[in-house]
Amino acid sequence: MTQIISHILPDVRRAAGSGHRDDALAPAGHFINGTFTPGGGSIDVVNPSTGEPITTVAAGTTDDVDSAVAAARAAQPAWGAMTPRERSEVLHLIADRLAANSDDLMRLESLNTGKPPAVAEDDVSSAVDTFRFMAGACRTMSSLAAGDYAAGHTSVILREPLGVVGVITPWNYPLLMAAWKLAPILAAGNTVVLKPSEQTPLTTLKLAELIADIIPAGVVNIVTGYGDPVGSRISAHPDIALVALTGSVGSGSAVAAAAAPSRKRVHLELGGKAPVLVFADADLADVARGVRTAGFWNSGQECGAACRVLVHESVAEALIEQLVREIGTLVVGEPGAGADVEIGPMVSEAHFERVKGFLDRAAAEGLQAAVGGGPLPGPGYFIAPTVLTGAREGSEATRNEIFGPVVTVETFATDEEAVRRANETEYGLAASVWTSDAKRSTAIPRKLDFGTVWVNSHLVLANEVPWGGFKGSGYGRDLSLYALDDFSRTKHVMTNHGA
Ligand code: NAD
């Protein structure tokens, strides 16, 4: 049983209505070669705010993946031969269509994931911006200027599409992660076979429905279903040139292993456990506000979440006081319960049990909940926003990705210890440094082994800058021109013009 140390837990604010209209749901079949085709099998899609079923979708097979790959392969030469300007125009149309349907997309995303309204709104508007950015960016793509590097020979570097790209997305940002992959992959001239998470397929199917009359048949194909067999077939398929996964470390290893025999490229965006380094000279009120937002965004189900505070021992008590004040006022509720709801449910019962398990073991290990500490009454899979203190070096709660509304606090004595402890994790996705000292703000980020380091901020993203990790958080970059690099290939053409 979870030990709740001292607190009155927040109430879960409930919505008045069911919060969804069935007419917003897309057809439940696979989207292959420009049309929805019914699939076999049936996967229940559940509303995590209530535990009630919403609908079912098809459980795809290897044959479904093979049909989708055949359609993508047939469509690729014509799509790849379009000029960047022509592809750019299509991407702008997709952005316009998503923006025009943002209410439906937000509602569906919140229904399926339990996302608070502000998160759903941010997801949809960010997805629109990703398509707009890539629409512009693909028109700027170039390579080295031609040059003579060997006697009598001129070199030209061409940038080409890879071919068919496979994409596998997670449940925490279903639409946004689909956009992060689709936009650069399409912009670079590839065609796609995408599998959404079996738990959250609704907005991806909606996206397909919305763009069906914009995108040429076969350019985007969606196959719903489980990691095995759909994800594993995408990873292994010999006609797929690259497989891109956003998901857990374990799935990343499975995808890379399945991809190896076909020697396809692999692009992995995996988990994270972002340290938040708070030095004695930091503005503690800023830190507490930053952790309130960045530690609990998307109910903590966020790979870059500010979930592991490492604070200088001289200011630890003062920071914990401020964190308790901030985190203790987070509004918990169903997405339909008001625009001010900040924390929703965990995405599924299984994930709720997983997060609860972390809290139980942390309590058994002697960590204290300064605020929160356990599950909230159902229906639905709600966990109280929690700050755990008293973590010793190496505690499970500070090492592993909890992926819920739980932030741990540890202390350090010196800058060297802060850096060493921050880097002592298998993950390398993101970190933040909080200090008012100019030298520290420049020196410490260079010593941190994470793909993104914020200074006096956390979890601020933009389409112009890359996102991706080191170490166990994978490799490959989403967003920015670097994603266009990752989803294309260079070819050297050398012409002999010597006499
Ligand atoms: P998950 O790994 O369980 O599932 C992700 C996707 O992989 C799903 O579509 C799933 O069906 C599929 N999958 C599972 N096993 C597979 C296999 N053997 N072969 C092929 N596909 C397989 O992850 P999740 O629980 O859906 O998402 C949460 C994880 O995603 C967290 O670890 C989180 O940190 C990570 N994430 C990372 C980023 C990032 O940008 N780095 C962003 C969002 C989420």
Image (cartoon, grey):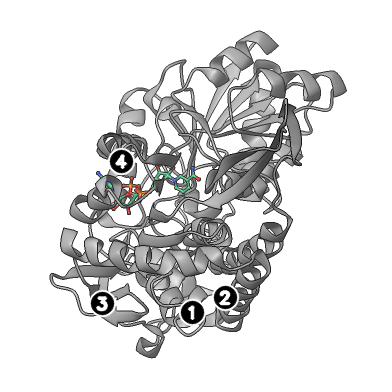
Q: Earlier in the sequence, mark 4 or mark 2?
A: 2
Q: Is residue 472 visible?
A: yes
Q: Residues within 10 Å of mark 3 (few under 14, many from 20)?
A: many
Quarter of the picture containing the N terminus is top left
Q: Where is mark 4, residue-wise?
A: 255
Q: Which residue is mark 2?
A: 94
Count of picture labels: 4
Q: Is mark 4 within 8 Å of ligand 1?
A: yes
Provide the secondary structure element on which disc 1 rests: helix
Question: Distance from label 2 to label 1 (Cα)?
Answer: 6 Å
> What's the amino acid at mark 1?
Ile
Q: Which residue is disc 1 drawn over?
A: 211
Tell me the CA gap for discs 4 and 1: 28 Å
For the residues marked 3 and 1, what is the alpha-carbon distance in whole angstroms?
16 Å
Of labels 3 and 2, earlier in sequence is 3
Pointer 3 or 4: first along the chain: 3
